[in-house]
Amino acid sequence: MKVLVPLFAARWRGLALALLLAATTLAAGVALLGVSGWFLTGAAITTAAASFNLFGPSSMVRGFSFLRIASRYGERITGHATTLAILSDLRVWLFGRLIPLVPFKGQDERTGDFVSRLTGDVETLDLVFLQVIAPLATALFAALGLGLFLWFVMPTAMPVALVGLGVSAIGAPLLLALSGRRSGAAVIRAMSDMRIAALDGVDGQADLVALGAVPLSRQAFGAAAADVRVARLKQARGVALGAGAAQFGAGLTVIGVLWTGLQAIETGDIGGPLMVGALLAVMAAFEVTGPILRGAGRIGQSMAAARRMQAISGAEPAIRDPARPIALPPGGVLELEGVRFGYSAARPVLAGINLRLGEGERIALVGGSGSGKSTLLGLLLRLSDVDAGSIRLAGLDIRDIRLVDLRSRIALLSQDAPVFIGTVRDNLLIGDPAADDATLHAALRRARLDDFVRGLPEGLDSWLGESGATLSAGQARRLCLARTLLAPAEILLLDEPTAGLDRDTEAAFLADLVTATAGRAVILATHAALPDGAVDRVYRFEAGRLAPG
Ligand SMILES: Nc1ncnc2c1ncn2[C@@H]1O[C@H](COP(=O)(O)OP(=O)(O)OP(=O)(O)O)[C@@H](O)[C@H]1O
């Protein structure tokens, strides 16, 4: 739960107010029932014999019931508002931590799991304050108040009531929380698997339909949903058992207090009305056990969720800024010397790359599929670090430069560049947030998409749908290309910029590359046939090395 501490600390005022109101609610409830018992018994005895002042207790009953309503309302509002604000803070924090860790490596860390942590896991933490911290604090307060009250009016009942309250509000929930750890973790795991199965099915819907594989996807989702049901059922069984045990404890306590109370009446230590009032006050104090038990039943789930978040907060991205960054001087000469790299030690991809890219030069990297073109471009942006050798920009090893500086000099159009949800303009402004309409249209023109965008009813403000659903694959690619061209970087890395374009558009774009890239240095990874003059030099990948192409 360490992740929650700073977030709770940042919102301590709201939490403290909610705690105060929760304690007031409980105190008013206890007092209400206590006074009512005292009042009713006193009034009943009055009609039989002695005199009893009805006005005092009846106004107290009204006062406490009003106070209880008002404080409960306030407590719900502040408790929930603060909790929602904390969860929102947590989501933002988590998003910030997760992004540098993408792409996830390993089986357990998939995109669906990432979404699951941001949504499901965070939501389970709502009960930490509302159903654990606040009710526990209130229970302590109740125990203290009730103990003091009984100490004065019926001391023999005090240990019985406190032990009973301790067992029901702390002992039973503690056992429940401990026994529910495994089922809680199972719920979290199963929910995450279910989200992953759902995302897989939605992402691959078209192919699954075309291949007639929808039943397989449904089966995978069904299995995940069944796991969720089983895990939840186990959890609910635990809560029911715990609630039963707590109710039993409450019943025994009331009998114990009644027993000691009757003895106290017999010895003349307490009057009948006050004893009844005290008995009902004890019963009312047990009100606090309900939320604690509900919280305890699910706390295993929250703790598993918190552990998953803690794991992220402890995880360091593989690529980090240098401890002592060196300011990047102007100039954009890029030099690679003896660069070796492999995703695993057993399978090197780059086996000694030497390359020099002068300012404003354009070169092309060609080679078979899987030869290492995209890998090399990724290294230039430090998406991974070289295993051996060095990459220098403006004379500095790129590992000595701040990432933000490096990436402001070099822009990449990746092979699977995404269209973000939003409009054409939203997508383009990611490349250059300050660009005006004329600049946006110029970039679109260079990417051979301007006519299309101008033909849309809302032009630059046309909505593109999720992942550019309203665009063809080639149009989406050109939009991403326009976005990269807009980036004010001196070096452009274009990975298959013409993928998805028809032959004529591809030839026109490549013929126009010099103008399109406006004097900037370019590394073009491509399978396309290059027209004369499109680039200054061509290199071919051969067994992890570069040879003049
Ligand atoms: N994230 C990864 N993890 C493990 N291996 C990878 C990863 N990305 C690429 N590879 C492997 O590295 C090799 C080079 O891949 P890369 O994507 O650089 O090739 P490419 O020349 O760009 O291919 P293409 O022309 O098909 O895009 C391939 O054998 C590929 O299987």
Image: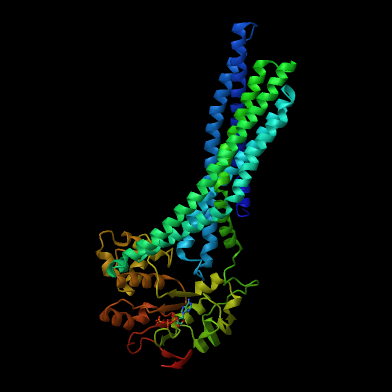
Count of numbered marks: 0
Tell me if residue 436 can be seen. no
Q: Residue at x 27, y 81 (%)?
A: 503
Is residue 189 at all visible to an observer of this figure? yes
Q: Give residue 522's position: percent from left, percent from top.
A: 43, 81
Left of 296 or right of it: where is 145? Answer: right
Q: Residue at x 52, y 53 (%)?
A: 122
Q: Nearer the viewer, residue 472 or 50?
A: 50
Question: Residue 517, how many percent across, how many down?
Answer: 39, 78
Q: Height in image: 542 above or below 231?
A: below
Q: Position of residue 244 (x, y in %)?
A: 56, 38
| Residue 499 vs residue 334, the one in the foreground | 499
Q: Quadrant of the C terminus?
A: bottom left
Q: Residue at x 55, y 23 (%)?
A: 65
Q: Is residue 517 left or right of residue 117?
A: left
Residue furthest out toward the bottom: 548
Residue located 53% across and 66% down the image: 100
The image's colouring method is rainbow
**Nearer to the camera, 515 or 4:** 4
Q: Quadrant for ligand 1?
A: bottom left
Q: Quadrant of residue 273?
A: top right
- Residue 475 in percent (x, y) is at 30, 70
Viewed as shown, does residue 196 lie left or right of 316? left
**Residue 152's quadrant in the figure?**
top right
